[in-house]
Amino acid sequence: MSQDDSRYDRGLETMRSIFGTGIESALKGLAATSPDLARCLVEFPFADIYPRPGLDLKTREMLTVAALTVIGYAQAELKEHIQGALNVGCTREEILEIILQMAVYAGFPAALEAVKTAASVFEEKR
């Protein structure tokens, strides 16, 4: 196994622990159009950054939910990371509190969109 393959495998394993095994079918869809982007998506954040010491997966997902709330336009990615945050131990209350905190910095329109996205995830998880 090459170093690149092991890096990809490490990233994929991290993604599975956050998003579940269904992540592989989503990656296959992306790889069909842009294999380089799919590989970068797996390797850089999930093999190089997420496994670093100092923050656990729950904290990293909480920070990701905050960042995606602030940027506002990445609702599909926010939805995936809210699901991931729940998978690694965040509560619904924590996620909503993160979004409320981000209203201070991102404004109410971004927070309102994030709450709508969170509500759709919570509804699906019922």
Image (tube, rainbow, N blue to C red):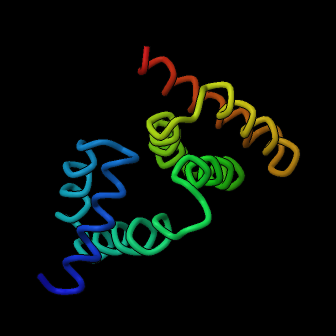
Q: Residue furthest left?
A: 1
Q: Residue furthest right?
A: 104
Q: In the depicted view, which residue is nearer to us: 80 or 50?
A: 50
Whether residue 79 sits left or right of residue 4 in the image: it is: right
- Give the answer, above or below, for where 67 lies relative to 20: below
Quarter-of-image position of residue 12: bottom left
Residue 19 pos. (x, y %): 36, 44
Q: Residue furthest front?
A: 53
Q: In the depicted view, which residue is nearer to us: 54 or 8?
A: 54
In the rendered view of the protein, which quadrant contains the C terminus? top left
The number of numbered badges drawn on the structure is 0
Residue 43 pos. (x, y %): 35, 73
Residue 9 pos. (x, y %): 23, 68
- Give the answer, above or below, for where 95 lies relative to 38: above
- Give the answer, above or below, for where 56 lies relative to 121: below
Whether residue 56 sits left or right of residue 72 in the image: it is: left
Whether residue 45 sits left or right of residue 5 in the image: it is: right
Q: Residue at x 21, y 65 (%)?
A: 31
Q: Residue at x 19, y 48 (%)?
A: 25
Residue 45 pos. (x, y %): 45, 68
- Give the answer, above or below, for where 94 lies relative to 14: above
Q: Residue at x 48, y 17 (%)?
A: 123
In the rendered view of the protein, which quadrant contains the N terminus? bottom left
Q: Residue furthest bottom?
A: 3
Quarter-of-image position of residue 4: bottom left
